[in-house]
Amino acid sequence: MSVRGYILIEAEVGNAKSVGEAMQALTHPDAKVLSVDTVTGPFDVIVQLEADDLDKLGNCITDGLQRVEGVQRTTTCLAVKLA
């Protein structure tokens, strides 16, 4: 079963556009980028990721997204199914 997460990204001032573009182009062996949106408000970019398990999702965040130049902070929200 795969896991999905929404990664809320705070970019350094003046870097929202370049961070969003870098996220669109990001490839990582542990997870797939499903969508990228540049947004207004307390966060600058929201990335939706999908991975086989939580560890792989975490690896993509720490080894991929957080290493993009201009990323200041990330907050991860995991998608859940409430029954």
Image (tube, grey):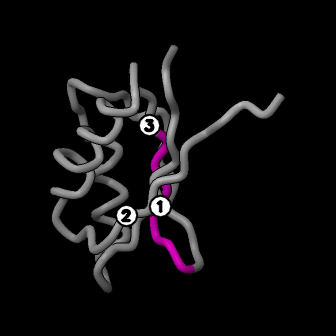
- Whichever of labels 1 and 2 marks the residue nearer the N terminus, that label is 1
In the structure shown, which secondary structural element does the residue marked by tag 3 occupy? strand
Q: Which quadrant would residue 12 be assigned to in this image?
A: bottom left
Q: Amino acid at mark 3?
A: Leu
Q: Which mark is residue 49?
A: 3
Task: Tell me the distance, in whole angstroms, between the alpha carbons under discs 3 and 1.
Answer: 11 Å
Residue under the point 33% across and 70% down? 73
Residue under the point 29% across and 47% down? 61
Front residue of 67/24: it is 67
Q: Is residue 83 left or right of residue 41?
A: right
Q: Where is residue 4 drawn, in percent x and y?
A: 52, 33
Asked if the magenta segment contains residue 36, the reply would be no
Q: Which residue is mark 2?
A: 74
| Residue reaching furthest to the top | 1
Residue under the point 16% across and 45% down? 63
Front residue of 17/68: it is 68
Q: Where is residue 32 drawn, in percent x and y?
A: 37, 28
Q: Which residue is mark 1?
A: 8
Asked if the magenta segment contains residue 45, the reply would be yes
For the residues bearing labels 1 and 2, Cβ distance under 8 angstroms:
yes
Q: On screen, 37 above or below 42?
A: above
- Whichever of labels 3 and 1 marks the residue nearer the N terminus, that label is 1
Q: Which residues are magenta?
A: 42-48
Is disc 3 surrounded by few (<14), some (14 to 19) or many (20+) residues within 10 Å?
A: many
Task: Tell me the distance, in whole angstroms, between the alpha carbons under discs 3 and 2.
Answer: 13 Å
For the residues bearing labels 3 and 2, Cβ distance under 8 angstroms:
no
Q: Amino acid at mark 2?
A: Thr
In the structure shown, which secondary structural element does the residue marked by tag 2 occupy? strand
| Residue reaching furthest to the front | 83
